[in-house]
Image (cartoon, rainbow, N blue to C red):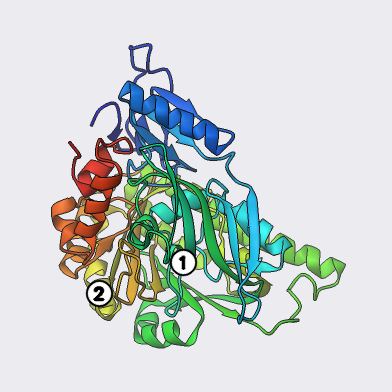
Amino acid sequence: MGSFRFRSAAEPSHPRARDDRWTNSWTNWAGNVTSRPRATETPPDPMALTRIVDRAVASGDTIRVVGAGHSFTPAAATNGVQVSLDRLDELEIIAPIPGTDGECLVTVGAGIRLHALNELLAEHGLAMPNLGDIDQQSLAGALSTGTHGTGAALPGLAAQVHGMRILLASGSVIEVSQDQHPEVFQAARVSVGALGILLAVTIRCVPAFLLRARETTMQFDEVMEGLDEFADTNDHFEFFWFPGTQGTLTKFNNRVPEGTPTTVDSLNTAAAAAYSARSWLDDELLSNGLFQFTNSLSARVPQLTGPLNVVASKALSPREYVAPSHEVFVSPRRVRFIEMEYAVPRAALSDVLQELTTVANRRDLAIQFPVEVRFAAADDVWLSTAHERDSAYIAVHQYQHSPYREYFDAAEAIFRAAGGRPHWGKMHSLTRTELTDLYPRFEAFCTIREKLDPRGLFANFYTNQVFGKLT
C-alpha cells in the first residue's frame, strides 16, 4: 500500500516519514485515510498541468487528483504527486439548448466546488436538477466517485454530464461526448480518476427552481409501510432511521410553481429573523452541535448510545419551508463520520432494511449515526451504481472516533447478498473480481483504462484494488 493506508480514526496519526523526499502530509475529511505525497501541485491553468504530467511521466511518478477529500476510500491518496484542480474553476460558456424550456449546457472548469457551481448557476437563473447533500466536493471529484442525490425519477450527477475535456497520460487533451469518443465518454463519467485528469465538464442544467421542504419525524414501521408511495409521489424523498429506536426523520422535497415566495421572502423582518434563528437551531445546534456532543459522549461511554439515540431521534421538530433548490438539497455536516453506502435494486430495499435492523440494533455495536436511505432512477453510465436498474441507496455511518469495522462488515454482507454495488468513494472491501460481476460494462471500462493509461500514471492502491494493477 506504499505510504498510505486505511486507518481507524481512533488511531494516532501516521508518524512523519523520515525520508526528506516526502515532506507533505494529507488526510481525508473523515480522518481514516492518510498519505504522504512526494509533491503537491495546484496548477493555475491546463498548460501548467500538462507540464506536471510530462514531468511525472519522465520521472516515473504517479499522479492522483484531490478535491475536498470527502471520499472515505483512499481514492485520492498517493505517495507520488497529488494535484488539486482548485484553480481550474472558471465558467467557460452557457449555451441554451434549442427546443427545451430554458435548459442550457454549461461548461466549467472541473475543479470548481459544488457550492461555487450552485451559486454561479443561480446567478444565471439555472440549477442542477438534482444534488447530493454535501456541496464541498469538487465537480471532478463528485462525478468521478458517482455522487448522487435522491429522487426515484432522477439519476445521479454523472447522468447530467453532456461532455468532458480530459488530459491523458500521453499529454494529449481530448474532448469526449456522445458524438466524440463515445466509449471514452461513457467510461469517463464515473472513473475514479483512473482514465485521466478532468479539465472541464459540460453539464445539462435546468431553469432555477424552488423546493418546498417538509421534514417530519415518523415511526420506522410507518415509513416501511409507505416506502414506495413516498418515493414515487415526491420529487425527492429520503429518510434517516436511528438504530435502537423506532424514530426516523423523513424529508419530502417537491417543486413549487414559479413565483412562489420563499419562506424568508414571505415573512416580515421580525418573522424572518425568527426563521433564521430556527434554521440555525435545527441545522447547527441540534443537527450538529448536540449531535457532536452525543456522539462524543457515547464514544466514551458506549452503554449510553441507545438512550442518546432516542434523544437524537426526538431532538428535531417538524418544519416546512420553501427555498431555492440547492439550499434545500444541501445540509451542513459538521460532525465527522465514517461511511459505507451501497446501491441495491429498489425492489430489494424493504427486505434489506429489515435484515439490516437486526445488525444496527445490536447493543454491542453501539451505533450512533442514523441509517440513511435514498433513491435514484436507472441510467446508462457504465460505472454508475444505478447502471441499468432503479436503485435504493442505504448508507451506514459511524462517528469518527468510534469503532466501525464490525458493523460495516456485517452490513456489507447484507448488501452484497442483495446484489448491491458500493459507492466508489465510500468504504467497501470489493475488488475487481467481485465488481466485474456487478457491472455489465466493467471489463469494457478496464480495457479503455489499459489503453489510455498503460503504465498506470493515474493509479494508486485503490484503483489497483477495484480495477486491477497495470503492468
**What kind of element bears circle 1?**
loop
Which of 438 and 445 lies nearest the eye of the viewer?
Answer: 445
Q: Which residue is mark 2?
A: 354
In the rendering, at what x and y percent does residue 184 appear?
35, 56
Residue density around tag 2, few if under 14, some if 14–19, many if 20 or more, within 10 Å: few
In the rendered image, the vertical position of residue 33 relative to residue 301, given as above or below: above
In the rendered image, the vertical position of residue 359 relative to residue 402, given as above or below: below
Residue 341 falls in which quadrant of the image? bottom left
Q: Which residue is mark 1?
A: 149
Residue 5 falls in which quadrant of the image? top left
Do the CB atoms of the residues marked 1 and 2 lie less than 8 Å apart?
no
| Label drawn at residue 387 | none
Q: Residue at x 64, y 52 (%)?
A: 91
Which amino acid is tagged 2?
Answer: Gln
Mark closer to the observer (1, 2): 1
In the rendered image, the vertical position of residue 206 relative to residue 439, given as above or below: below
